[in-house]
Amino acid sequence: MRRVINYWRLVSMLTLPILILFPLLSPAAGPGAQEDKLVGHWTFEKGSELKDLMGNFADITLNGAKVKDGKLDVDQGKWAIATPYTGPDIL
C-alpha cells in the first residue's frame, strides 16, 4: 500500500507542473503556430469551396464527395483530390 501511495505522490508531482504550464504553452501550439509551413488551405466557403487559398494546389476535383454546409463530405467510396502540387518542396 505504501508503494501505491508513493507512486501516486510521484505522479502528482510530475503532473501538477504540466497542468499549471499547459495554459501558458497552448497559445504557442494553437492555430497559426505553423502557418509559415502551411502548403494548402481550403475553407469550403461559398464561392471558393474548391480553391486552395495558398495557391499551391489546383482546384479540388470531387469524385462522389460534396461540399455541404462549409464542410467537405467524403463518405465511404467517395473521394476528393487536388493535384498537381506546385508549391515549395515538402520535407
Image (tube, grey):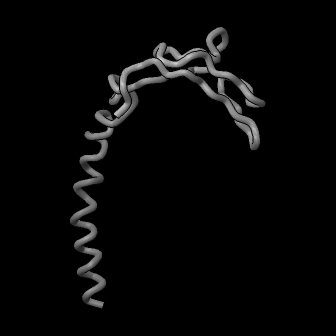
The correct choice, above or below, for 1 with respect to 20 in the image is: below
Q: Position of residue 56 (x, y in %)?
A: 47, 17
The correct choice, above or below, for 58 with respect to 8 in the image is: above
Q: How many numbered marks, from 0 up?
A: 0
Which quadrant, please, contains the N terminus? bottom left
* Left or right, 2 with reference to 59: left
Which quadrant, please, contains the C terminus? top left
Relative to the observer, which residue lies in front, 9 or 75?
75
Q: Position of residue 25 (x, y in %)?
A: 27, 40
- Toward which corner of the image does residue 32 lie, by quadrant? top left
* Left or right, 78 with reference to 36: right
Q: Residue at x 74, y 29 (%)?
A: 63
Residue furthest to the bottom in view is 1
* Left or right, 17 with reference to 36: left
- Toward which corner of the image does residue 15 lie, by quadrant? bottom left
Relative to the observer, which residue lies in front, 64 or 6?
64
Q: Position of residue 80 (x, y in %)?
A: 67, 29
Q: Residue at x 30, y 53 (%)?
A: 19
Q: Position of residue 18 (x, y in %)?
A: 26, 54
- Toward which corner of the image does residue 2 lie, by quadrant? bottom left
Q: Residue at x 32, y 39 (%)?
A: 26
Q: Residue at x 35, y 26 (%)?
A: 37
Relative to the observer, which residue lies in front, 34 or 62?
62
